[in-house]
Amino acid sequence: DAKTTQPPSMDCAEGRAANLPCNHSTISGNEYVYWYRQIHSQGPQYIIHGLKNNETNEMASLIITEDRKSSTLILPHATLRDTAVYYCIASNSGYALNFGKGTSLLVTP
Amino acid sequence: DTGVSQDPRHKITKRGQNVTFRCDPISEHNRLYWYRQTLGQGPEFLTYFQNEAQLEKSRLLSDRFSAERPKGSFSTLEIQRTEQGDSAMYLCASSARDVTVYEQYFGPGTRLTVT
């Protein structure tokens, strides 16, 4: 699986969009980009995944650059409950996920 | 749908003892995964079952670790002769039968402390 690089921490004001970047410059053509988050003391929660096209669901949007070397997870209107560690994972298997250290997002009032 | 459940939630054991954890996946999910998470790190993949077959094991799964899923439903993870380095959160996840579904549902984890 390709290595991913994320900033260790970010802040966001409540109600504003949170844009979480991820670099995966060595991603191969058959590797998907997955995003999970982990709220303190809970198991990880799936957010979204994509291959080439931008994706949107009820939780978030995923923007993947045309060269697929980076992506951004967008939480359109962050709430205090979105405070969590966000993990960006590149994988072609969909099962053997290795999460890395992720980005700790703090949403402030 | 009650989600993935794990038992126990916490386990304290002395070095050298054996421990066993149980995971009950979401019913009808045929895939089950075990992960380990140490403090400050993200989860690391340990092993994966499709039905009762163990299809992949990480090199993190030393010979002191064994996982089973005897009837393709619940799974157990046993650690023999525990070491202090085994202290971690052990997470279980499951996913649906459909090969195009990649979403893994995680349980709350079992926190193991080896003294």
Image (cartoon, rainbow, N blue to C red):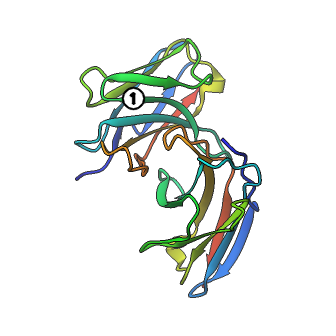
Residue type marked 1: Phe
Q: Give the residue at x 75% y 49%.
A: A26
> Percent x, y for residue B9?
41, 39
The quarter holding residue B54 reads: top left
Q: Residue furthest bottom?
A: A15
Pick whichever, A39 or A70, lies toward us: A70
> Percent x, y for residue A76?
55, 82
Q: Residues within 10 Å of mark 1 (few under 14, many from 20)?
A: many
Please say whether residue A39 is visible from this viewpoint.
Answer: no
In the figure, B51 relative to B99: above or below? above
Image quarter in which the N terminus of chain A is found: top right
The quarter holding residue A92 reads: top right
In the figure, A4 relative to B54: above or below? below
Which chain does the residue under circle 1 lie in?
Answer: B
Q: How many marks?
A: 1
> Percent x, y for residue A37?
54, 59
Image quarter in which the C terminus of chain A is found: bottom right
> Percent x, y for residue B82?
56, 17
Q: Give the residue at x 63% y 46%.
A: B42
Secondary structure of the residue carrying numbered label 1: strand
Pick whichever, B47 or B62, lies toward us: B47
The quarter holding residue B20 reads: top left
Please say whether residue B90 is visible from this viewpoint.
Answer: yes
Q: Which residue is mark 1?
A: B49
Pick whichever, B12 or A32, lies toward us: A32
In this rendering, would A85 be left or right of B10? right
